[in-house]
Image (cartoon, helix red, strand yellow):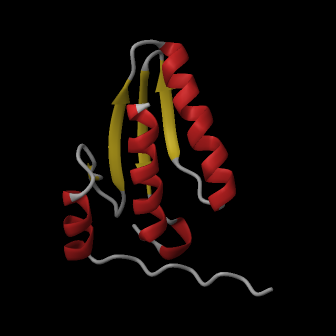
Amino acid sequence: MGLNPMPAKLDAAARAQALIDLPGWAEAQGREAIVKRFVFADFSEAFAFMTRVAILAEKMDHHPEWSNVYRTVDVTLATHDAGGVTELDLTLAAAMDRFARG
C-alpha cells in the first residue's frame, strides 16, 4: 500500500472559485489559507462541533488550525506541506459547514 500523493496547491483563481461554494469562508489575510468563524448557541454546541470535526480530521490526517472562546470557533485551513489551500481543505471546510448545520 503506497502513500497518497500530496494534493496540489490551488492557485488564487481556483481558491476564489472554490469559495463560491463555501458560504462564509474567505481568504486569510497575509497567507494562503481560508478562514471562517462559526458561532453556536453555547459552549456545549461549539465543543460538540469541534469533537465531530476532530474525529473527521483524524480520519483524513488533515487538521485545522482553530481556536474556541465560549460559543465561537475560529478556523483557518491550509495544507502546510503544500504551502497553501488544497482539495483537502475544501473537503474539510464543506464537512465543517455540514456539521455546523447539525
Q: Quadrant of the N terminus?
A: bottom right
The image shows residue 81 at horizontal and vertical percentages of: 56, 72
User: Which residue is found at the position 51% from the left and 46% from the top?
Assistant: 65
Quarter of the figure that contains the C terminus: top left
Pick the front one: 7 or 82: 7
Q: Is residue 30 above or below residue 70?
A: below
74 up-or-down from 18: above or below: above
Q: Is residue 32 above or below residue 38?
A: below
- Residue 42, given in percent of the width and then of the height, sits at 45, 12
On the image, which quarter does residue 52 sit in? Answer: top right
Viewer-proximal residue among 26 and 17: 17
* 22 vs 90: above or below: above
In this picture, residue 86 sits left or right of residue 50: left
The image quarter in which residue 32 lies:
bottom left
Residue under the image location 61 percent in, 49 percent down: 56
Give the residue at x 46% y 49%: 95
Q: Check the image and name the residue furthest to the top.
A: 42
Q: Residue at x 40, y 61 (%)?
A: 90
To which quarter of the image does residue 47 belong? Answer: top right
Residue at the front extreme? 102
Q: How many numbered markers are drawn?
A: 0
Relative placement, left or right, of 70 versus 13 is right
Horizontal and vertical percent for residue 84? 41, 69
